[in-house]
Amino acid sequence: MASQKLTSYLTAPVSAAPLAVFRIIFGGMMLASIVRFMLKGWVTELYVLPKVYFPYYGFEWVKPLGETGMYALFGLMALSALGIMLGLFYRWSAVLFFLSFTYVELIDKTNYLNHYYFVSVVAFLMILVPAQRHFSLDVLRKPHTWVSHVPRWAVLIFQLQLGLVYFYAGVAKLNPDWLLEAMPLRYWLPAHTHLPLIGPLLDKVWVAYLFCWFGAFYDLTIPFFLNWRKSRLLAYFTVVVFHVLTAVLFQIGMFPYIMMVSTLIFFSAGFHEKVLNWFRSIANVRQPAFPKFAELSAQPLLLNLLALHFILQVLVPWRFMLYPDKLFWTEQGYRFSWRVMLMEKTGTAFFYVRDPETGGETEINNRDYLTVAQEKQMSTQPDMLLQFAHMLRDDFKRKGISAPEVRTETYISMNGRGSRLFLDPNVNLAAEQESFLPKTWILPFNDDKLQQEAVGQK
């Protein structure tokens, strides 16, 4: 009985206007982001010039396509984003955008950002909805496909996805460093004291605490305030202020703007109808007069697929509980969990390759292999440290050493704490295998005795 009521609620007809506006906004923001990425030369910098790449575990087959191939891929991505925005050959555009964007992101985990993951997730959801059947060029091509209403789930899934992003970002802030030490904001904010109006306040400790506590409250509650009609306008004003501040204080690209426009999906159908009427007046087109509902033949299958998707979205951020020690220290289970700007972590990694037959050992200059960005990210993340060790092993095998041993002395400073040894320097990383199991060669964060023993044995 309860499942029938839920199904009836999810499949009930609602206005297609919010879905159409979201399609236009999402496609337009992606097109602008891709063009910006290409104009700044980041395609060449990140996907052509590096000598090596750090693929995700299980996706080692994803490789860069060379300069011509990468620019062609970004060109395809831009065209598909334009297709999404205009609703032109929409289904093909949505599939191509999801595949091309996600492929690029899988090439090198050096470039991982939460909002890139968010874009891939939303792009996947865009494939499943009939967003092209209202105010689109596909409707102009095939007028009989026009609908005034879509199933409620087609709009609800984007509200739910945004809500999960915000909520888990808030949950991630419920940690001692953020709430009790105001870190890393206490470290970051004083760098912006030159800003007008708010600048003189940013070196005050109480301001860092205010930002931290408000940030946690904001993330945990904003989906509910946006969903409540009476608080929606004030909540959206808060969204704009919050993300404008983050854009000014922390250079994090398009993410603040993507979130500002995406949260419009919470507004009423009447608001989105007004937006579309404005577009119609510019394009000089009329909406058909008779209402029509989008009948989706595969709807039960889609609902089951979406249920699986959101179960994973709820569970994946908690996978860090399967690993020992402090999450920010080990970073096991850190990615894909909506943890945004929660730590200041720097590392220095020294690698040594030893020939067991001669006993000779070579200290590695990391820059002979890695870009500045790659070395920075690799030096703090254990899976990337392991990958680099394997790269060195394979390279020295090609140079004639049959079974090279690779060890590292890596030192980490996190959230204002002093630098400390990160990995066991006595472990031959060349012999360690990547897996989802806990990495036993990460030294415990709070065990000074083990730290001292590791240093003494190396």
Image (tube, rainbow, N blue to C red):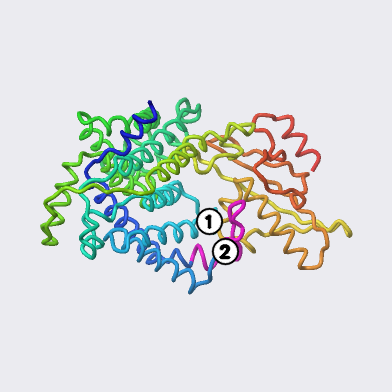
Residue type for callout 1: Leu
Please check the rendered image and state whether residue 59 is part of the magenta-colored stretch, yes or no: yes
Please name the residue shown 50% across and 30% down the image: 177
Residue 58's spot in the image, x, y percent? 61, 52
Q: In the rendered image, which quarter is residue 265 located in?
A: top left
| Picture layout, residue 286 above or below residue 443 | below
- Of 344 and 138, which appears nearest the observer? 138
- Which image quarter is the N terminus in? top left
Left or right relative to 84: residue 49:
right
| Helix, strand or loop status at disc 1 | helix
Decide: is 85 above or below 180: below
Give me the disc on residue 63: 2
Which residue has dot 1 on it?
Answer: 106
Where in the figure is residue 120, as x and y percent of width and height? Answer: 43, 51
- In which quarter of the view is residue 74 placed? bottom left
- Magenta extent: 45-62
Q: From the image, give the main secondary structure of the stretch colored magenta.
A: loop
Horizontal side of residue 361 vs 262, given as left or right: right
